[in-house]
Image: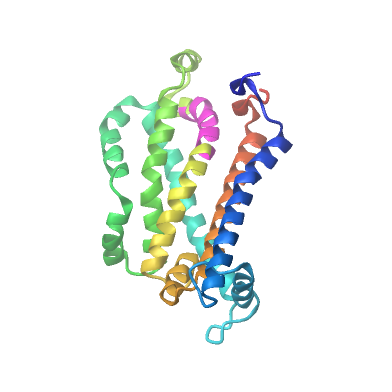
Amino acid sequence: MRWVNRHMRRNDRIVLGSVPVALLALVYLIAAVRRHAADPTDKILPLPDAMVRAMTALVTQPDPLSGQLLFWGDTLASLQRLGLGLGIATAAALLVGLVLGVLPPVRATFGPLVTGIAVIPPIALLPMLFIALGLGETAKVALIVIGIAPVMVRDIAAHVAALPREQIIKAQTLGASSWQIMIRVALPQAMPRLLQAMCLALGPAWVFLISAEAIASDIGLGYRIFLVRRYLAMDVIIPYVAWIALLAIAMDAAFVFLSKRLFPWAHGGGH
């Protein structure tokens, strides 16, 4: 059987997917052991026990100044910013995307503007945001919104505009107005696409969050990473990066599960 025709079962996919991760961990461990054999004080590739000790202090021991557990405080602060930014961007993408997708005159008027904003590197706007909005939470959330909302709007608008014209004609034949077409025809079919757009926006959203926290913040995962880098504390940086990856994977899996559960017809699971 040709490989293109082979369909993997869930357990097989899990096993095969874990192989590259295990190999990467093994390569790292071998390299770390060799570096520490040559230089026991090496900080570039810390051994697992050093990472465990460093993270145990951040996870279980309160900070002498603030009295809070730094790891959980950083995680909560970052997730709050990310959730708020992603929520605002998603709401804007759904509303604006529906309007642009259903109404051609509006799409012709504002489509180029959305496209222009979408191609601007959001990081280039970071100094402007800090000047205009200050160094507080508003600027950090705004960077996430500006970074992902225009792309999500374009995706939803393009998906809605590509809906079969027959659906629009049939709805009008039954007396539906533009507003009713938007709500009754376009919205249900846009929702699975919206969750897919949220999955695709997770990566950039994390990038913008970490960038904002690294420049102006006193708590957060990105703040902690850039704070300890000056001490070459790779025993903290590597676990933090791994934690961010795990959070992103969990969020992506949650969105996929939610989409399949709420909209099985969009995944070939029924009508």
Of the pair 131 and 251, the residue shown nearer to us: 251
Q: Is residue 20 visible?
A: yes
Q: Relative to 135, say whether 119 is above or below.
A: above
Report the number of discs. 0
Q: Quadrant of the C terminus?
A: top right
Of the pair 180 and 4, the residue shown nearer to us: 4
Q: Magenta part mainly helix, strand or loop?
A: helix
Answer left or right for 6 relative to 115: right
Q: Relative to 248, say whether 263 is above or below.
A: above
Residue 106 at x, y percent in the picture: 31, 31
Q: Relative to 114, say whether 6 is above or below.
A: above
Residue 148 at x, y percent in the picture: 40, 47
Q: Quadrant of the N terminus?
A: top right
- Is residue 192 found inside the magenta-colored segment of the image? yes
Residue at figure coordinates x 36%, y 50% from the top left:
146
Q: Is residue 96 visible?
A: no
Residue 261 at x, y percent in the picture: 67, 36
Residue 224 at x, y percent in the picture: 48, 71
Residue found at the very far front of the displayed protein: 38
- Is residue 236 found inside the magenta-colored segment of the image? no
Part of the protein shown in magenta: 182-195
Q: Relative to 205, say whether 4 is above or below.
A: above
Colour basis: rainbow
Of the pair 160 and 54, the residue shown nearer to us: 54
Of the pair 162 and 56, the residue shown nearer to us: 56
